[in-house]
Amino acid sequence: MPEDFSQDPISWIQDREHAIQLLSAYLTPGLFTGSLWDPAIERRLGPRERNTIDVEDLYSPTLLSAAIRRSAGQVILERADTITGLLHAVDHDVPLWDPDGATVNRALEAAERLVKELQSVLHVGPTRASKLVAAKRPQLIPIWDSQISKALGAGRMSWHQYWMAWRRSITPAVGELRSIASEVEHPNLSPLRTIDIIIWMDRWGWNDLPAGQWAELRTTCRARPPSAE
């Protein structure tokens, strides 16, 4: 299995102005339901909510086009005690770029146990499990989906390999990603979520931008070279 991506996620912010335009377009009210995901999860990160997955949390992946089936949601709620215990073990104060590698490894090992528990539920694959956990630990866990994996050339990575590849890539760029998020007036956006949005918009999301004011951005994205696969 590869240990690094074929294409560095941070290459998507080398053209800073383009990255800002993509992020701004995504976060424009009324265009993408995903723009509602971040404020929704932020309200669920208080001391009482951050270690539980309840009915409200089960709706959040729907905003990212990964709805949880009713039958799967029922099983997750029935396993609430187990899932709460696993979430407690994932330190909520540790970001993926924390300089203490041992601390990050412990948090990721705990997160992997949680992801695998969620994936053991019928109809909860890696995308849905990832989005549920990323909603609870947005500074630690990057969202996984097949499109982003394809763009990065991630190949057949284990969870730990995928997360560590993200750690190596994002750590030197955290300050720049925060600056970009602040420039579009979303300073609380996780650096992981910021780069996730930019990559997704650059490769696929631009297709859904309405014509008119976004014509120039759509043309720029259409002309960009394909990403690694």
Image (tube, rainbow, N blue to C red):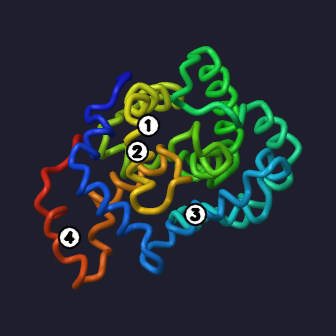
Q: Considering depth in this image, is 173 or 26 the residue closer to the camera?
A: 173
Check disc 1 and report the residue beneath it. 174
Marks 1/4: CA–CA distance = 27 Å
Q: Is residue 18 left or right of residue 92?
A: left
**Three-letter residue code for mark 2:** Leu
Q: Considering depth in this image, is 216 or 32 the residue closer to the camera?
A: 216
Crowding near the residue tagged with mark 1, few <14, some 14–19, many ≥20 C-alpha atoms within 10 Å = some
**Three-letter residue code for mark 3:** Trp
Numbered badge on residue 37: 3
Q: Earlier in the sequence, mark 3 or mark 4?
A: 3
Marks 2/4: CA–CA distance = 22 Å
Q: Earlier in the sequence, mark 3 or mark 1?
A: 3
Residue drawn at (54%, 62%), measured in percent from left and top?
66
Q: Are marks 1 and 4 in contact (CB under 8 Å)?
A: no
Q: Are marks 1 and 2 in contact (CB under 8 Å)?
A: yes
Residue drawn at (64%, 43%), measured in percent from left and top?
137
